Amino acid sequence: ERVEFVSYYHQIIDRFEMQTPKGIHLQRELPNGSYYVWMDKDKMTQVLDNIITNAIKYSPEGGTIKLKTEYKRHQLLISIQDEGMGIAYDKLEKIFERFYRADKARTRKLGGTGLGLAIAKELVEAHHGQIWATSKEGKGTTVYFTLPLMNQKRRGA
Ligand code: ATP
Ligand code: MG
């Protein structure tokens, strides 16, 4: 279905804001215009839920999560940046594999199956996008993904 991404994303973030624990601050950097994407809303919601839930789960108390969307090369580039524990460089690619959980001892107590990002990758690719992450141990993690825009995009003010 044809979805205006910015207003859709605002709604997702609104929902998280009402339930975010640990005094975590969600900081939006979304464009003002309208950007139309062809997407399965339920599946994209699963992608964003997975990534944002991770960012919250691995954030320190009082941390800020930056939720950014920008227009780049005829695509939307969506990024979710946290100030959490980070992921070692040699483990970054593996986090998108099924059942992979970095640093078992540290993450065991936080719960989860290690499926979230594997599913997110599958669903982003089904939307003809790409997903990847960058991270600095002890400083934080940023997860990025792209979504192709539909032709008749209308960009406002
Ligand atoms: P599930 O999502 O199935 O509940 P999970 O969160 O452990 O479990 P994924 O979402 O697939 O699984 O993430 C895989 C692993 O990548 C996590 O166990 C964690 O080690 C690491 N990881 C993911 N996101 C972050 C993040 N924002 N900061 C630090 N580590 C992360
Ligand atoms: Mg997860």
Image (cartoon, rainbow, N blue to C red):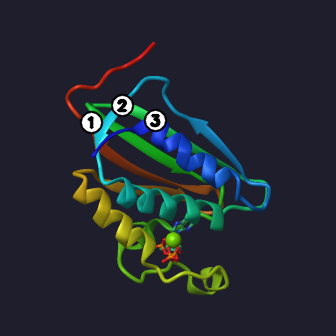
Judge the density around disc 3: few (<14), some (14-19), many (≥20) Cα neighbours within 10 Å: some
Instruction: Name the quadrant containing residue 115.
Output: bottom left
Instruction: Tell me, yes or no, whether the two marked residues, 1 and 2, touch with CB atoms within 8 Å.
Output: yes
**Distance Cα–Cα, label 3 vs label 1:** 12 Å
- Residue 92 is situated, as x and y percent measured from the top left of the image, at 43, 66
Q: Is residue 80 above or below residue 112?
A: above
Residue 151 visible somewhere in the drawing: yes
**Distance Cα–Cα, label 1 vs label 2:** 7 Å
Under tag 1, what secondary structure? loop
Question: Which residue position holds label 1?
Answer: 149
In primary-sequence order, the first of circles 2 and 3 is 3
Question: Which residue position holds label 3?
Answer: 6
In primary-sequence order, the first of circles 1 and 2 is 2
Instruction: Tell me, yes or no, whether the two marked residues, 2 and 3, touch with CB atoms within 8 Å.
Output: yes
Q: Is mark 2 within 8 Å of ligand 1?
A: no
The amino acid marked with disc number 3 is Val
Residue name at image x 23 percent, y 59 percent: 126
Q: Is mark 1 within 8 Å of ligand 1?
A: no
Q: Is mark 3 within 8 Å of ligand 1?
A: no
Residue name at image x 31 percent, y 44 percent: 147
Judge the density around disc 1: few (<14), some (14-19), many (≥20) Cα neighbours within 10 Å: some
Question: Which residue position holds label 2?
Answer: 35
Give the position of the C terminus as an image quadrant: top left
- Residue 35 is situated, as x and y percent measured from the top left of the image, at 36, 31
Under tag 2, what secondary structure? loop
Q: Is residue 96 above or below residue 105?
A: above
Residue name at image x 33 percent, y 64 percent: 121
The amino acid marked with disc number 1 is Leu
**Which residue is at the front of the view, 96 or 41?**
41
**Distance Cα–Cα, label 2 vs label 3:** 7 Å
**Which residue is at the front of the view, 97 or 127?**
127
